[in-house]
Image (cartoon, rainbow, N blue to C red):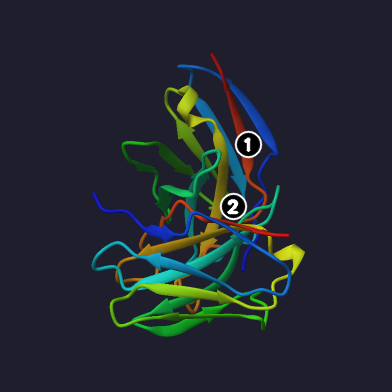
Amino acid sequence: DAKTTQPNSMESNEEEPVHLPCNHSTISGTDYIHWYRQLPSQGPEYVIHGLTSNVNNRMASLAIAEDRKSSTLILHRATLRDAAVYYCILRGPFSNTGKLIFGQGTTLQVKP
Amino acid sequence: AAGVIQSPRHLIKEKRETATLKCYPIPRHDTVYWYQQGPGQDPQFLISFYEKMQSDKGSIPDRFSAQQFSDYHSELNMSSLELGDSALYFCASSGTGAYNEQFFGPGTRLTVL
């Protein structure tokens, strides 16, 4: 499975945008980029996923570089509830199942 | 909306005892995944089932076994418990298609004394 690299931690102020980067230089042409987050004392939660084009949903936006070697999760207005560990995960369509392989994520701290 | 249900939420066992964790997926979800998260660690995939058949296996000890029943609920059986098995165990479910998003339960916190 292709590897992702994320910063250990990031800080943001409440109500400001947050850009969480992820490098995946060994991504294959068929790998999807998924983002999950884990709030304190909770199970992981799906955020967004994409293949090539930028994606938006009610929670966030995903910006994917043209060469697909990196992506950025964008939270448009951070709230205290967004403080969590954010995981960038690659999932290929030809793997046996859709298991998630969690690497080291980014711990986001949101300051009031 | 219905979510993934896990029981029990907390479990305390002695070394060498046996534990059974249960997972009830979201209705109409046909795939169940089990993950283990040790203290200060990231979740690690253990095993998954699709339509009651084991579909993938991760770093699951031989002392652990799991199955998915006809009603799609799943059980993770853990025998000869060791101190290192103390962890949060998450179950997740997804609908048809391995690349559908996974919905996680609240987890079972297992403490082995």
Dot 2: within a 10 Å radius of its alpha carbon, few (fewer than 14), some, or many (20 or more) residues?
Answer: some
Residue found 49% across the figure and 54% down from its top? B9
Kind of residue sitting beneath label 1: Thr
Return the chain for callout 1: A
Q: Earlier in the sequence, mark 2 or mark 1?
A: 2
The label on residue A69 is 2
- Give the Cα distance between marks 2 and 1: 21 Å
Can you tell which quarter of the image residue A76 is in?
top left
Q: In the depicted view, which residue is nearer to us: A61 or A98?
A: A98
Q: Are marks 2 and 1 in contact (CB under 8 Å)?
A: no
Q: In the depicted view, which residue is nearer to us: A74 or B4?
A: B4
Can you tell which quarter of the image residue B61 is in?
bottom right
Task: Name the mark nearer the viewer: 2 or 1.
Answer: 1
Return the chain for callout 2: A
Image coordinates of residue B25 in percent, x first then y, are 34, 65
- Label 1 belongs to which residue? A107
Element type where label 2 sits in the image: loop
